Image (cartoon, grey):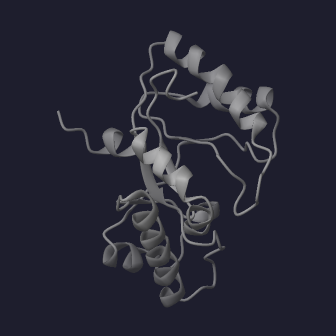
Amino acid sequence: MLADQDVPATFFQCGSNVQRLPEIARDVARGGHEIGNHSQTHPRFSFRTSGFIQAELRRAQESIERAAGVSPVLFRAPFGIRWPGMRQAQRRLHLMGVMWTVIGCDWKLDARAIVRRVLPNIENGAIICLHDGRELQIRPDIEPTLDAVRRLLPILKAEGYRFETVSQLICPTN
């Protein structure tokens, strides 16, 4: 769908999912999309040690590098939870932390509700958080997300928005 619309995206991937489905990570990279680190097992980082956090991020880096042949430079914390020790782990692995400006809550809403939630909050530079999976679930139902994207892309393009990866957005070359 993204290729058909000539839309690049950033996929923050969990290392365990990448290990289970390495061809997906390879397809994402080959498709010109960016891959970010989303931890190995998608844990809640609250009350976790800095050693645990660093191991989660490192294992995900290794999983993505092995499968897709790319080394992520971005990290998005599962559940958006920031915790002491995370900054140190990110620095050691040369990862920039990234959050979102608009979250679709697509893990619990239908497509129409996702669109209603996202559209009013779009502005230049927005980072939209949607999910291509559900944590580490095998074969999650992501049809509401796909349907929402099918609806959002033409609307946003008609409004004049263009799409970039997160790195292109925050580190423009021009």
User: Could you tell me which residue is drawn at 46 percent across and 51 percent down?
Assistant: 26
Q: Residue furthest front?
A: 23
Among the 4 quarters of the image, the one containing residue 14: bottom right
- State whether residue 62 is above or below residue 21: below
Q: Residue furthest top?
A: 158
> Residue 71, how many percent across, how many down?
35, 62
> Residue 130, how many percent across, how many down?
63, 43
Q: Nearer the viewer, residue 98 or 22?
A: 22
> Residue 87, how many percent across, how many down?
40, 74
Q: Nearer the viewer, residue 52 or 24?
A: 24
In this picture, residue 119 sits left or right of residue 170:
right
- State whether residue 98 is above or below residue 53: above
- State whether residue 26 is above or below residue 57: above
In this picture, residue 170 sits left or right of residue 160:
left
Among the 4 quarters of the image, the one containing residue 150: top right
Q: Residue furthest left?
A: 174
User: Could you tell me which residue is drawn at 59 percent across and 31 percent down?
Assistant: 121
Q: Nearer the viewer, residue 50 or 142?
A: 142
> Residue 146, how many percent across, how many down?
69, 33
The quarter of the image holding the C terminus is top left
